[in-house]
Image: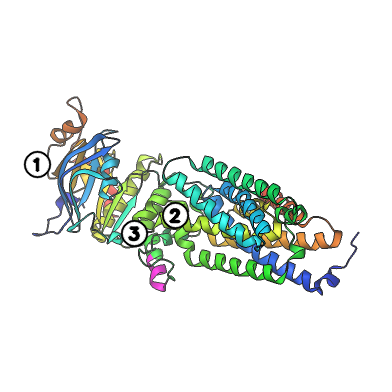
Amino acid sequence: MITISILDLLGYRFFQNALLGGVIAAAACAAVGLFLILKKEAMIGDGIAHTAFGGIALGLLLGINPLLTALGVSVLAVFGISYMRRKNVAPSDSAIAVMLALGFSFGLIVISVAGGFNVELFSYLFGSILAIDQADLLVVSLLSVFVLLFLGFFRRELLSMVFDEDDSRVMGIPTNTLSLAFDLLVATTIVLSIKVIGTVLVVALLVLPGLSALQLGLSFRKTILTAVGFSIISTVLGILFSASFDVATSGLIVFIAVLLFLLTLAYKKLQ
Amino acid sequence: MNSMDTQKPAKVEPILELEKVDVERSSDIVIQNANFTIHRGDYVGLVGPNGGGKTTLILSLLNFLPRAKGKIRLFGVDIDKFSAWQKVAYISQTATNFDSKFPLTVRELVSLGRIKKGNVARRFTREDWEAVDDSVAFMGLTEATHKRIGQLSGGQKQRVFVAKALARNPEIIFLDEPIVGVDAATQEKFYKKLSDLNTKRKTTILLVTHDLTSVFCRMSKVLCVNKQVEIAEITSDLDPNTLLKKAYGEHFHFVFHRHECRGVFENDNH
């Protein structure tokens, strides 16, 4: 049973903030996520997200905005992974595994040293969009706008690189730089999504909308727009149901995203 | 029309020159002492046994592989200082092995060919889109413009990558023949398109191929590669077997009668 009507909710400032932050982060996630899928590197998203946890713990310990420390640690993780790949220390997936474990264990150590911000930490692990404050909304919006602008400007170069890296190099695209820039963009996207969906489930918002859109067999342009659409639908519905039924937002967002994915699969089968 | 019938202009600009080039891969010499020159407007068939170094040679011409020795000049400029890469297009052997679900239409893929070095993230102009649509039309893909590339036939897949290369009006195309398993007639149509490109747009083409008949019927030069590199102008005096035996070995025999070329390419004038 709906305990609070949606119309009532829309009148509240906290709820408007939640929807605005959710929509803009969802759009950034889906757009970056589609490139990640096409690059076959979805797991770097999960790896960086877990590393970001270490950054959050550090921020809480030092009393700095945890989103900023998470961004710092995620960026370091990207450089770490990139270094291991370039120097052939470890293949990509292993490098990600090492960073994931290192970042997460770092977080655990910081928590045990500080010994007591478990409740707040929980909100970063699983998101707390309904509790987003003005400062966080500003951080999320600025980062999202930056991510979307970057993708808008470099979409062709990125697309070319994920499609055929060798040919892109011949065409004069600086693929190494672009690849690193893209990974940094992934780190940024993950950090801005932490408030919405949390570090544990962020990979779902990166991967599911793009995967669903890919089932439809559309052009690239329509695929990315559809992915963004699916992502926004999942997030908005997730926030609405979560506020109405008092159920975990991130859980609902992921569930709706999976539902949309199943629907696109069914649509494809019926075609 | 056969390329061997065309008269060569008196002075043609050399656009690719190799001097005593050695190329090593994991400390094995794969190409040894390569010396040859390709001129503007040449249509060169690159032949040789598997593992003989054809792809390695192409990659070193793109400066993807370091040379152990020697000099390569592109458009008269030392390759290490060469920067006008927009003049060069490359189609790899694996170009057609893309993920069939990749979300790109023919027009979208071809448009990626318009990306320019040093001017990334620019807005496409009408000129860009005209060049894209021209290239699509030239390769006979207009009807498939809005199709996803994964839905194309094998022959169309070969052509769409040439269209992408053409979109930036390159002066030379390196084409490591894409393996798509198409039938002989489709393959023949593909070579016909490349001939058109060579004669109508004066694009220099360097094509890695196993189809020796097409090379000796259609092209102006043949590069024979098996560690050593031999180049020969294809004229009526050239005995293919003398040349080919150097690369393929003494037991190799290629049955070739020049008069058969007309039969093979009977549709050329239609």
Chain for disc number 3: B
Q: Which residue is mark 1?
A: B237
Say if labels 2 and 1 share a chain: no
Chain for disc number 2: A
Q: Are marks 2 and 1 in contact (CB under 8 Å)?
A: no
Dot 1 or dot 3, earlier in sequence? 3
The x and y percentages for residue B155 are 40, 47
- The kind of secondary structure element at disc 2 is helix
- From this view, report whether residue B149 is shown above or below residue B200: above
Say if labels 1 and 3 share a chain: yes
- The kind of secondary structure element at disc 3 is helix
- From this view, report whether residue A201 is shown above or below residue A8: above
Residue B97 falls within the magenta-colored stretch: no
Report the span colored magenta.
B125-131
The x and y percentages for residue B164 are 38, 57
Instruction: Say what amino acid the circle numbered 2 marks.
Output: Met
Residue B130 falls within the magenta-colored stretch: yes
Q: Residue at x 40, y 44 (%)?
A: B94
The majority secondary structure of the magenta stretch comes to: helix
Q: Is residue B247 visible?
A: yes
Q: Are marks 2 and 3 in contact (CB under 8 Å)?
A: no
Q: Which residue is mark 3?
A: B166
Q: Residues within 10 Å of mark 3 (few under 14, many from 20)?
A: many
Q: CA distance from mark 1 to mark 3?
A: 33 Å
Instruction: Say what amino acid the circle numbered 3 marks.
Output: Leu
Q: Residue at x 50, y 46 (%)?
A: B99
Q: CA distance from mark 2 to mark 1?
A: 46 Å
Chain for disc number 1: B
Q: CA distance from mark 2 to mark 3?
A: 18 Å
Q: Which residue is mark 2?
A: A161
Q: Quadrant of the N terminus of chain A?
A: bottom right
Instruction: Please name whichever residue, B36 or B139, is drawn nearer the observer in this view of the structure.
Output: B36
